[in-house]
Image: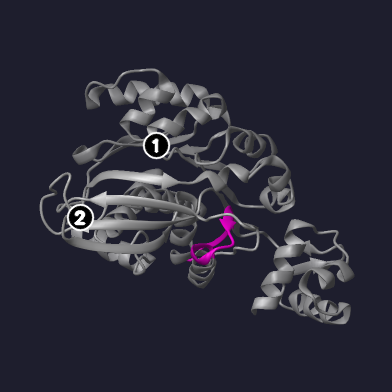
């Protein structure tokens, strides 16, 4: 499928009743050209018949933040209130965008919805993410606004010391804008949301996703509370211990307390949950199914940025591939480990083969 065919299929997926002349106006081409592309898409099996009935949808929709990550790596132990020698690197980031890129690296078809400024960083984000295999046609470019920027400082061990984010633009992702993508969202195989978006946007997604399973990245303890009233709408949740405490209102003093907290989440309607617990690994549980600990994977950490995003992408990929939940958790931990061992927010070498090779080396 060439670029133009992808554009037209994306438009039809969002509005199956759209007229050919409308598509032509949107793309700046003739109606006869649109007709030719539609005929080709029909011959290839992407469109099944009149009314633009699409063949089975294989796409995933990711809604969330996109920003440029500016990371400072200290060569030595940090000396506060002084200039420290190190290295500074800029890479495309944002929780939602990271998840979408990781899904593309794993061979999935992610469609990404976000807000991007019409500045240099914004154009870099669009170009890089498209090249990675993510459909960016549903991202909204805001004229005169700055793209979100996330600045973090890592110590000599690769651990984050502090970070500052300028992400106000994502607040402009409103229900009316999301409504423009309603058909595309409701025809997805999976919807992934990160909690950087506004409560009103979250509410719209939970109320309008229909029967599409929803995975949620809580992002941080500060932002996790946004989904507290929507837990019954969530299929899979991946919080850390602190985020799980905030959402449940239950304290986790030791790892022995985690199963009780997990039971509470299941009572709220969550089908699958995976709670990260540092060196102990991940406690996972599927309602009326498998549960237990999955040990952490020994990793030489270069940067922690993006590791959690890679894990959620792994969980989503495995769900679509009908893998068991224990297998899914282990696969997603390997995705996270490969990201931890990379200087990039998204490890460009992430692939199913790399994940499988890592897991085989541990057995």
User: Which residue is found at the position 46% from the left and 26% from the top?
Assistant: 266
Bin the neighbour count of mark 1 within 10 Å (Cα to Cα): few under 14, some 14-19, many 20 and up.
some
Bin the neighbour count of mark 2 within 10 Å (Cα to Cα): few under 14, some 14-19, many 20 and up.
some
Task: Kindly indicate the quadrant of the structure image that contains residue 354.
Answer: bottom left
Q: Is residue 55 left or right of residue 117?
A: right
Q: Over which residues does the magenta segment extend?
A: 107-122
In the rendered structure, does residue 117 fall within the stretch colored magenta?
yes
Residues under numbered marks 2 and 1 in contact, where contact means CB atoms less than 8 Å apart = no
Query: Vertically, is 4 above or below 279?
Result: below
Q: Nearer the viewer, residue 32 or 83?
A: 83
Q: Nearer the viewer, residue 202 or 256?
A: 202
Residue 1 position in % (x across, y down): 64, 78
Residues under labels 2 and 1: Cα distance?
21 Å
Q: Is residue 30 visible?
A: yes
Q: Looking at the figure, which quarter contains the C terminus?
A: bottom left
Task: Name the mark on residue 315.
Answer: none
Task: Name the mark on residue 220.
Answer: 1
Task: Name the mark on residue 301.
Answer: 2
Q: Is residue 363 visible?
A: no
Residue 290 position in % (x across, y down): 37, 36
User: Which residue is found at the position 22% from the left and 45% from the top?
Assistant: 296
Residue 188 position in % (x across, y down): 64, 52
């Amino acid at each position: 499928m060439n670029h133009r065919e992808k554009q037209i299929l994306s438009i039809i997926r969002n509005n199956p009743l759209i007229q050919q002349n409308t598509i032509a106006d949107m793309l700046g081409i003739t109606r006869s050209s649109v007709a030719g592309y539609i005929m080709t898409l029909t011959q290839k099996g992407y469109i099944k018949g009149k009314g633009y009935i699409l063949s089975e949808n294989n796409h995933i929709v990711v809604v969330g933040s996109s920003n440029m990550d500016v990371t400072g790596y200290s060569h030595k132990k940090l000396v506060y209130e002084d200039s420290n020698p190190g290295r500074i690197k800029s890479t495309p980031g944002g929780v939602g965008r990271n998840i979408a890129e990781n899904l593309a690296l794993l061979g999935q078809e992610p469609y990404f919805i976000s807000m991007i400024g019409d500045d240099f960083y914004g154009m870099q984000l669009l170009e890089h993410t498209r090249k990675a295999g993510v459909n960016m046609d549903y991202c909204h470019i805001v004229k005169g606004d700055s793209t979100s920027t996330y600045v973090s400082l890592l110590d000599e061990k690769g651990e984050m010391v502090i970070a500052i984010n300028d992400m106000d633009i994502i607040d402009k992702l409103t229900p009316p804008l999301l409504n423009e993508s309603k058909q595309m969202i409701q025809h997805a195989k999976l919807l992934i949301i990160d909690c950087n978006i506004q409560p009103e946007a979250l509410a719209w997604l939970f109320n309008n996703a229909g029967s599409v399973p929803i995975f949620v990245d809580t992002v941080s303890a500060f932002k996790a509370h946004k989904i507290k009233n929507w837990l019954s709408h969530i299929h899979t949740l991946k919080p850390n211990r602190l985020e799980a405490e905030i959402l449940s209102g239950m304290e986790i003093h030791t790892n022995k307390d985690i199963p009780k907290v997990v039971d509470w989440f299941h009572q709220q309607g969550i089908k699958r949950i995976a709670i990260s617990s540092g060196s102990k690994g991940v406690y996972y549980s599927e309602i009326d199914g498998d549960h237990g600990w999955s040990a952490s994977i020994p990793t030489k950490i270069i940067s922690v940025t993006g590791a959690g995003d890679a894990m959620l992408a792994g969980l989503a990929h495995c769900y679509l591939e009908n893998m068991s939940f224990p297998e899914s958790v282990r696969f997603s931990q390997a995705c996270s480990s490969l990201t931890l061992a990379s200087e990039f927010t998204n490890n460009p070498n992430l692939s199913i083969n790399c994940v499988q090779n890592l897991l085989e080396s541990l057995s």
